[in-house]
Image (cartoon, rainbow, N blue to C red):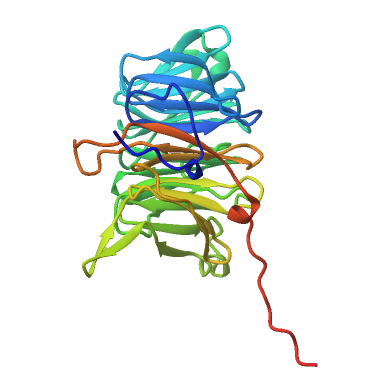
Amino acid sequence: MTAVPPPSSGRELSNPPADGVSNLRFSNHSDHLLVSSWDKTVRLYDASANVLRGEFTHGSPVLDCCFHDDSSGFSASADNTVRRLVFNSNKEDIIGKHDAPVRCVEYSYAAGQLITGSWDKTLKCWDPRGANGQERTLVGTYPQPERVYSLSLVGNRLVVATAGRHVNVYDLRNMSQPEQRRESSLKYQTRCVRCYPNGTGYALSSVEGRVAMEFFDLSEASQTKKYAFKCHRKSEAGRDIVYPVNAIAFHPIYGTFATGGCDGYVNVWDGNNKKRLYQYSKYPTSIAALSFSRDGRLLAVASSYTFEEGDKPHEPDAIFVRSVNEIEVKPKPKVYPNPPA
């Protein structure tokens, strides 16, 4: 019998996916939580009530999901399709297709468009309102230097991280070419990119236990603020064991952020003051995804083995929803010495 994790992990959601969790996201309007999985499903939970509200099954693993409104969302699947899922009427339709598995999906409220990134090395923008045939729906296809691994939006800015450590920054109002073409400042494969809520830059994590803090403004003054730090590592018998950092989630109120790694830990960081604020007690297996609720009071944690060590016996896939205390996420004020009298 496996040991039951202490309640400090948070409340475990009932009816979890039967295979790896690819992503989870809180709604912008409520405590609804959308979860995509390698078990070919997208599930909608009411995270506060711990109730499964709906479920759609696809023909292949689902690699990403995002909300459209509180009861509908979009999915990105390994069967190359992009789907719209309406939970209250139990209806789904295919918005469009890529030529390879679709890895990422984001909905832009600013542009009213859906953005998808695929292993076919393209980004596509769709207008979900014109869902009568793909010709009307597809706004544009934008070639990328490599397979798309992660996307993030803030306002009209879109950051695209691909294989080969490329990072493209776009303005959604002019997608003809990237506003900036960058290279990751980390040496190893990118796992996750997430924009700062204040729109000034992005955090990017790699498979080698590191996170880079980057800024959009190319002025020297801004670029001197960028830095990278090590995390999700441990020393054992005199050598460093390094874990992939799979997930980054920003707190919507304080702008601090949580990272989740294959070491089973969730850490909370104050990026401005370069400090770790908190480390939650260890989860049963790798942290595959993280999301704060819209008010920052809840944190959803996917404890789900990500096969970084190949196929091996592992803890069951689980989703924990924990209540967030202010002390865990609020930046600590800088203490200055008292001036001499």
Residue closer to the observer: 144 or 316: 316
Where is residue 76 shown, x and y percent of the image?
40, 24
Q: Residue at x 63, y 45 (%)?
A: 252
Where is residue 321 shown, x and y percent of the image?
52, 36
Q: Residue furthest front?
A: 1
Name the quadrant containing residue 104.
Answer: top left
Name the quadrant containing residue 30.
Answer: top right
Where is residue 203 shown, x and y percent of the image?
48, 53
Q: Residue furthest right?
A: 341
> How many labels sit on residues?
0
Where is residue 79 shown, x and y percent of the image?
31, 19
Q: Residue at x 22, y 70 (%)?
A: 238
Residue closer to the observer: 200 or 217: 200
Above/below status of 278 relative to 118: below
Report whether 301 appears left or right of 333. left
Report whether 205 appears left or right of 216. left
Residue closer to the observer: 239 or 291: 239
Q: Residue at x 40, y 52 (%)?
A: 205
Q: Residue at x 46, y 24 (%)?
A: 14
